[in-house]
Amino acid sequence: MKSLYDFNYEQMAELALSHEWKKFRGHQIFQWLYRKRVTSIDEMSDLSKETREILKANYALKPLTLKDKQVSSDGTTKYLFALEDGSLIESVLMQFDYGKSICVTSQVGCNMSCAFCASGLTKKKRNLTSGEMVAQVMYVQQDLDKQEERLSHIVVMGTGEPFDNYENVMNFLSTVNHDRGLGIGARHITISTCGVVPKIYEFSKEHTQYNLAISLHAPNNTLRDELMPINHAYPLEELMKAIRQYASENNRRLTFEYILLRGVNDQKEHVKQLAKLLRGLNAYVNLIPYNAVDEKGFQGVDHAHAMVFYDALMKEGIRCTIRKEHGADIDAACGQLRVKHLRKEAKERQGN
Ligand code: SAH
């Protein structure tokens, strides 16, 4: 059964028409979901009982089941959810000076196998539906409603590769962005990709105002091949060509994510290579402190070393920032809480 969260505003109007209702009913349902933020179809009190029965017979809301919630001293909140099929996913709420941001998961597991990342410890089981991504945002927003606060930003940076689940991600974003619903501004929404080149071209043509972030992490092919297997399929030349195409078609500033890994990609030569790669682009580099993942054997750099890299890159004329760490005292690294729970479940199974 489909979830009502699977339908964006236009699709909700079509849903109404498909039941031979007025289009306006779609608008009403959308408002109940995203303005009043009801958690059941029965609460949609200005719909007739008959309409509600038809809705209930054909669509669910499919809320998520909360399995764990960790709150950090800095306010970062990590939610572990079970989906209808029992799959576990994580969402993270982060507090910034400029607002509250949710990090959304786009797939169960991930196939990109980046060498440093916990998400890839479990292969992709399936794509999330659009509704399952909307449901993450709704759960966290409903939690915030208790304090009369609202989400202002979304980053699609949780487990999964959003450009490997392109249509559902775009559909999800059109729902949460719509001004008749949550109305989270497109400029407050960021999609992060490891570099799925054909989808970067496709995304360029959409001319949305969403921000695009590229997980770069290495400034040459040898190193990037080692860290990110996607580089074998789409090496840096092809990635940068696609990015330049995006930049020529969209007047948006790009973000390049770069985790500083000690002794791996943090040397002077890497600064030079990075600067050469990015020169002339309307872009900045987000230097990311590494969240150590036990199994991976990589180490991050200390703040002083990050500052040296930062200064050197700025001197080369490349704008950059050092990302503030969030939730350092909880299982905040990408996919860590989920992996911990999967292990616990496996242990329990063995024990039985
Ligand atoms: N697949 C997408 C989005 C999910 S990952 C992508 O690759 O962009 C979101 C970001 O977190 C990526 O930049 C990723 O490389 C980074 N990341 C993964 N593991 C990390 C870790 N342990 N510490 C810090 N950043 C990490």
Image (cartoon, grey):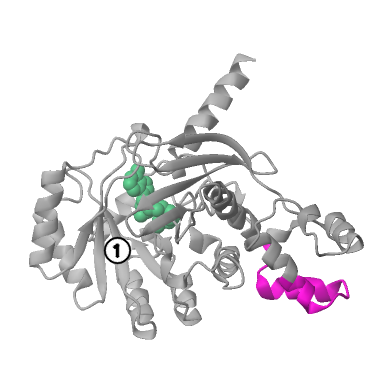
User: Disc 1 residue type?
Assistant: Phe
38 and 168: which one is in front? 38
Q: Looking at the picture, tell me which residue is in the foreground, 335 or 75.
A: 75
- The location of residue 310, given as percent across then percent down, is 14, 57
- Where is residue 260 drawn, in percent x and y? 22, 49
Image height check: is 132 above or below 272? above
Q: Is residue 110 left or right of residue 296?
A: right
**Helix, strand or loop status at disc 1:** strand
Q: Position of residue 63 (x, y in %)?
A: 68, 47
Hey, which residue is sitting farthest front in the picture? Answer: 148
Q: Would you identify the image quadrant in which residue 47 lies? A: bottom right
Quadrant of residue 270 within the rendered picture: bottom left
Chief secondary structure of the magenta portion:
helix
Magenta span covers which residues? Answer: 6-27
Q: Count all numbered tags in the image, as a single digit.
A: 1
The answer to whether the beta carbon of the residue marked 1 is less than 8 Å from any atom of ligand 1 is no
- Percent coordinates x, y for residue 126 in the rendering: 61, 50
Pick the front one: 267 or 162 = 162
Q: Is residue 119 above or below residue 162?
A: above
Q: Is residue 121 above or below residue 277?
A: above
Which residue lies at the image location 18% right of the left edge and 42% below the top edge? 301
Residue furthest right in the image: 50
In the picture of the structure, the residue carrying the numbered disc 1 is 256
Which residue: 23% across, 61% down? 219
**Residue placed at 26% from the left, 76% from the top?**
282
Q: Quadrant location of the N terminus? A: bottom right
Within the magenta stretch, is there residue 8? yes
On the question of residue 115 being in view, the answer is no
Q: Is residue 258 magenta?
A: no
Question: In screen coordinates, is 1 left or right of 66?
Answer: right
